[in-house]
Image: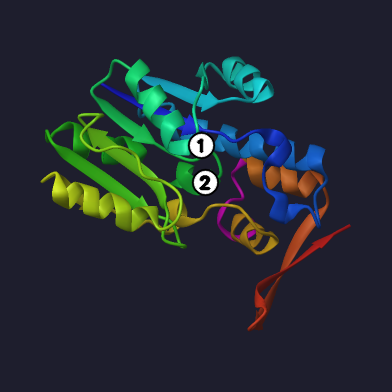
Amino acid sequence: MSSAIIPVSPLKSAKSRLKKILTLEERKNLIKNMLLDVYTGLKNACSSIYVVSRDREVLSFSRELGVIPIPEENTRDLNDALQYAIEKIEDSTVAIVPADVPLLRRENIGRLIKKVENRKRSALICPSRGGGTNLLILNPKDIIKPSYEGFSFLKHLELCRRNRVKLYIYPSFYISIDINTPEDLGEIFIHGKNTYTYRYLRELGISTFPRHSSAGRFVIVRD
């Protein structure tokens, strides 16, 4: 059996790089819609889904979705929070996914989890575009300790090598996209038209146009 953990930062400090186009309340709602997309991508692939956060609003929203909330207690950072959550979960296989990867639902996550479930002492990693880790599946759940922040993809590779873990690297364009900047929103308009995130951005009057220059690929505008 497998479970998924979605770590979520406090909403009041979330996605500050989007503050030029979104208010604080809009950024909070963006996080909730992305979380809903991640949940949708995981719900048929796992026996249980958990959200770990210190934000009461996040925990309450997660509970409404049918997700099991894990309030952070005395944790110093993201890795502490994930380790705390892992220790509370009974399933032997665990998938860790950030809340800001709404295109995850375009992948067959169940197939990736089964690949790891079927081989003891194995892990699967999907890197982000910036060298982070946007999906980490572990069997057993404690075979390595989560080592996020910075170039976590390289850190997890090294931990698997040191611990002689069978490692699967799955480079997925959709899973590699995490939403942090206005430029990132352009990918949602191209590849995520079936997502809650896309519908929310359209409700806000946000649109995107192509731009071919060193300044980026997209122009993001708001009505």
Q: Is residue 84 left or right of residue 193?
A: left
Q: Is residue 142 left or right of residue 7?
A: left
Residue farthest along the right direction in this orientation: 223
Q: Position of residue 8 (x, y in %)?
A: 56, 34
- Amino acid bearing label 2: Val
In this view, 217 is above or below 167? below
Pointer 1: what residue? 38
Residue 101's tag is 2
In the rendered image, residue 15 lying in the magenta stretch gets the answer no
Looking at the rendering, the stretch of residues picked out in magenta corresponds to 189-195
Residue at the image point whose x is 28% and y is 41% from the top: 112
In this view, 115 is above or below 1? below
- Amino acid bearing label 1: Val
Identify which residue, 43 or 182, lies in the foreground: 182
In the picture, which quadrant includes the C terminus? bottom right
Quadrant of the rendered image containing residue 186: bottom right
Label 1: few (<14), some (14–19) or many (≥20) C-alpha neighbours in 10 Å: many
In this view, 215 is above or below 139? below
